[in-house]
Image (cartoon, coloured by chain):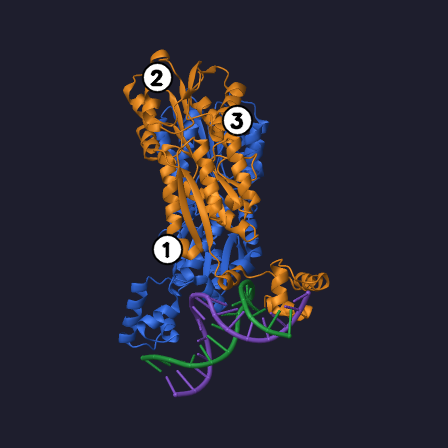
Chain colours: A orange, B blue, C purple, D green
Amino acid sequence: MKPTVHDIATAAGVSLATVDRVLNRRPGVSVRTREKVDAAIASLGFVRDMAAANLAKGRTYPLVFILPSNDNSFMRLMEAEVRSAMLRSALERTDIRILAVPAFDTAPLVAALDRAAGEKPAGVALVAVDAPEVIAAVDRLADAGIPVVTLVSDLPASRRVHYAGIDNIAAGRTAASLLGRFAGERAGPIAVLAGSMLVRDHRERLDGFRQVMAESYPHLRLLDVVEGRDDPATVEQLLLRLFREHGDVRGIYSLGAGNRGLIKALRQTVFDRRPAVIAHELTETTRLGLIEGLVDAVLNQDAGHEVRSAIRVLKAEADGSHVLAAQERIRIDIFLKDNLP
Amino acid sequence: MKPTVHDIATAAGVSLATVDRVLNRRPGVSVRTREKVDAAIASLGFVRDMAAANLAKGRTYPLVFILPSNDNSFMRLMEAEVRSAMLRSALERTDIRILAVPAFDTAPLVAALDRAAGEKPAGVALVAVDAPEVIAAVDRLADAGIPVVTLVSDLPASRRVHYAGIDNIAAGRTAASLLGRFAGERAGPIAVLAGSMLVRDHRERLDGFRQVMAESYPHLRLLDVVEGRDDPATVEQLLLRLFREHGDVRGIYSLGAGNRGLIKALRQTVFDRRPAVIAHELTETTRLGLIEGLVDAVLNQDAGHEVRSAIRVLKAEADGSHVLAAQERIRIDIFLKDNLP
DNA sequence: CTGTTAGCGCCTTCAA
DNA sequence: TTGAAGGCGCTAACAG
């Protein structure tokens, strides 16, 4: 039979309350007593039943998710996943609030973080913009003892406890490896389309992409990066201009969002040889692109997994327990038209 | 405040015990009373706290995993994952036993299933061999009210409640899509290496692969399938012979195991143009193959995810609750050397 | 500093 | 067919 608090109370010759104090590192226990209890815990191999503990505490976990509010399919998907987690909150003892902020914008994000701090939640998750003010705001939360998880785009210089997202350098490298082979052996230009160099994930993807292109596919020449700010209309205009100037483009790496514009531009243009295209995030748009054969591969991060992972990590952090690292690793999903879910 | 059994007892004007009887569909409640309670449950939107219920019941879930015992890296990995789940069983209220059976062998598998049934577990997971006797044995478990989950290789004709594995047809199609592009535009032969056509996953991968090769890459000609029974030595011999006969092989799809033999054969052979190679399951062998550049892509299924998923499904099934479908979908992971974990 | 007592939400005897 | 009472493992007042 698994030992319980009673067993260790008996073994240590103290009361339940004292055992509980030691278990929860609460003050008011003499060093000697604490040692006795710790010894009993160790020798009996006691592991506390978190379900029972949570039941007794009636604990719930107030959580805040800060998400960009722009018109971006992936972020809308992310929000939908958070809302679906809210539906489960009765079962999972969570109490989730969403704070929407303008995308790529430092000041409102900082304001949201400070507001979140005021609510004294058990944890905060945010899609980070990489700016010193944001790092400072995250660190303020850390100072207040509130664990922070970054979603999608990391902030490694901050004191966030976890990053729930893909390795974007690896994603960029993967994109290059695929595009390099899909584009074939003849020389030619490659277009790179980004959202904004203000967010770390886009910068990292670009870095990874450049590394592998330079190492392994020197016959493919990278054109200047086009920044479309994840906006479909902008993306479309910029690409149409690019296609006019470089009719022989051999490949396109779209490392940000706004892929509706990409697809539109591709549809309107006649190429003598269709360029190989790799985009990010599986949305209705990119899915159709794959099926129609306009897009060759989509690199994806599973928004549902990221949200669930963020919640697990935040809860574990809040009660000082641990998660399974393997379960929290966010994969770089690669979708071709053949393995669409 | 979430309603509890007390609230619905009050609302229905009955005692806690009666509510409990209705909740657990136990006999000894008049129809009228049952209806009153059901009405109260519905109107208050009561959802029972499984953690509390399990605490009260002191419930544990005895689970049996039936795994092939051959010398196959992936299956060893799978076993390691089950063992790691056994370590967590105190926390997860599981009590897991592993039954080892010879691979690709019907009779011992059937015996193991029947033995498992005798232990009256809360659920059984197995790597299925596709044979009528196995289907019958699985159905006997179903008759006994024991939920069964298939791992890695499915048995759709049986009454298993769930399949924790990848879509193998899609995996084969994906392999073809990648290999077709990696192999380039010149015509040439493609080798296909399988383990055994007795297991459904291998057959399905082959089917998917053939479909796409025929549809999209007619200039690549499939050689006769080589069956290596997932044994490295056999695989090596068979491939060396094949390379001797077809020095110009453009691509290789290894859809089973035994990849140590594949790597050895590749190392020993001099090609004028290295064939594109796609294999299954990320193991030490295939990982090295990727890094060395002998293998171009590895399709993988996450053994840890499959095991955790099987456990979640079996537990949920045992207490009539539900799982999140999205969380239980096993992805076809595609690894290049650039996105190795 | 330490112990006693009464729950958390649900289940299970044992009586009625 | 129904209800009262006690307990699962842990926590949280409230006393000493």
Specify the quadrant that holds the N terminus of chain B: bottom left
**Residue marked by disc 2:** A273
Residues indicated by labels 3 and 2 sit on the same polypeptide chain: no
**Would residue B196 appear left or right of A243 to someone viewing this image?**
right
Element type where label 1 sits in the image: loop
Residue B158 marker: 1
Residues indicated by labels 2 and 1 sit on the same polypeptide chain: no
Residue B97 appears in the rendering: no
User: What is the crowding at mark 2: few (fewer than 14 residues within 10 Å), some, or many (at least 20)?
Assistant: few
Residue B244 marker: 3
Q: Where residue A218 sits in the image (x, y, percent)?
A: 50, 16
Q: Nearer the viewer, mark 1 or mark 3?
A: 1
Return the residue found at the far top: A245
Amino acid type for the residue under numbered disc 1: Ser
Element type where label 2 sits in the image: loop
Specify the quadrant that holds the C terminus of chain B: top right
Q: Nearer the viewer, residue D9 or B163?
A: D9
